[in-house]
Amino acid sequence: MNRTGLIVALIIAAIAGALLGIFPGLDLGVAAYFHSFVDVNKNYFAWRIYPPVMLARDVGLWVGTIIITPVVAALVFKLILPRRKLLIPGRAILFLMATMALGPGLLVNAILKEHWDRPRPIDVKQFGGDQHFVPWWDPRGDCPGNCSFVSGDVSGAFWTIAPAALTPPAIRPIAYGAALALGTAMAAFRVMAGGHFVSDVIFAGVFTFLIIWLCYALIYRWPRTRLSDDDVERALERIAMPGYRMIGALFGAKKT
């Protein structure tokens, strides 16, 4: 989570944005290649129903869920029993839940996919659909909802960069490599299936990384905003204690 990563992400965004914005036919060209794969039942974009690809996508989707589940459980345990020490460091809980909520949750699925009306490749007229193609920068498409820009699956896969950033330094390069490999593989699966254009998956990864980078800087690096694990633990205790005391009073806890 250093400046080098930020610079690389911004360069990728600038090059991809300019190239695919000026020449949107590149998006269509890649999609056309995968549209040409046809199975015996005349299904185009046939990779989308190829069992090994479908299984790989499903496995990729479960990775983020498996990682975030114990984090949520540790938070809930703390809120129920605020006097007990957190089972996971407080900053890690805050960082992982904030990046998941703000990246794949708010920005990607709640804002962009619902309000940036770009149709998916499989739905555009060039590939047998009934919606007109628009470049990545144009939100004025025909898609009614859950649209193409950007990919939620890819954002979720690239979110694994966040837990990778918290691994011990000795294995952190391996963790980053695994997260990037997962995100890249998910991006390939979604393009192959006709679910997204190349620009959709590139910006899904870039936007997710930028949110992770910013949250890491705010929580761990910048002196004016960084927190300690104790700061987070005390804040959670302050939030949970009133409810804890009220429940104790309701169940007739006796004063001594």
Image (cartoon, rainbow, N blue to C red):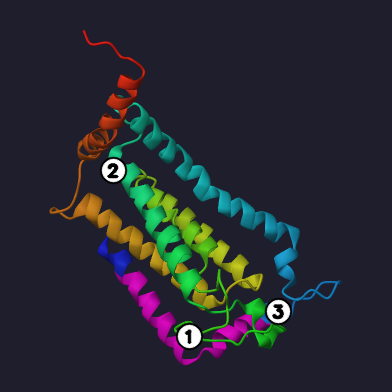
Disc number at residue 35?
3
Q: Which residue is mark 2?
A: 91
Amino acid on which the number 3 mark rests in the picture: His
Q: Please tell me which of labels 3 and 1 falls first in the chain.
A: 1
Query: Residue 57's x, y, as percent?
Result: 62, 57
Q: Is residue 87 visible?
A: no
Amino acid on which the number 1 mark rests in the picture: Leu
The residue positioned farthest toward the left in the image shown: 224
Q: Is residue 195 visible?
A: yes
Q: Residue, x 45% and y 71% (percent of image)?
A: 112
Q: Is residue 15 magenta?
A: yes
For the C terminus, the quadrant is: top left
Q: Please tell me which of labels 2 and 1 falls first in the chain.
A: 1
The residue positioned farthest toward the right in the image shown: 40
Find out whether the residues at labels 3 and 1 contact each other: C-beta distance under 8 Å.
no
Q: Which region is colored magenta?
A: 7-32
Q: Which residue is mark 1?
A: 20
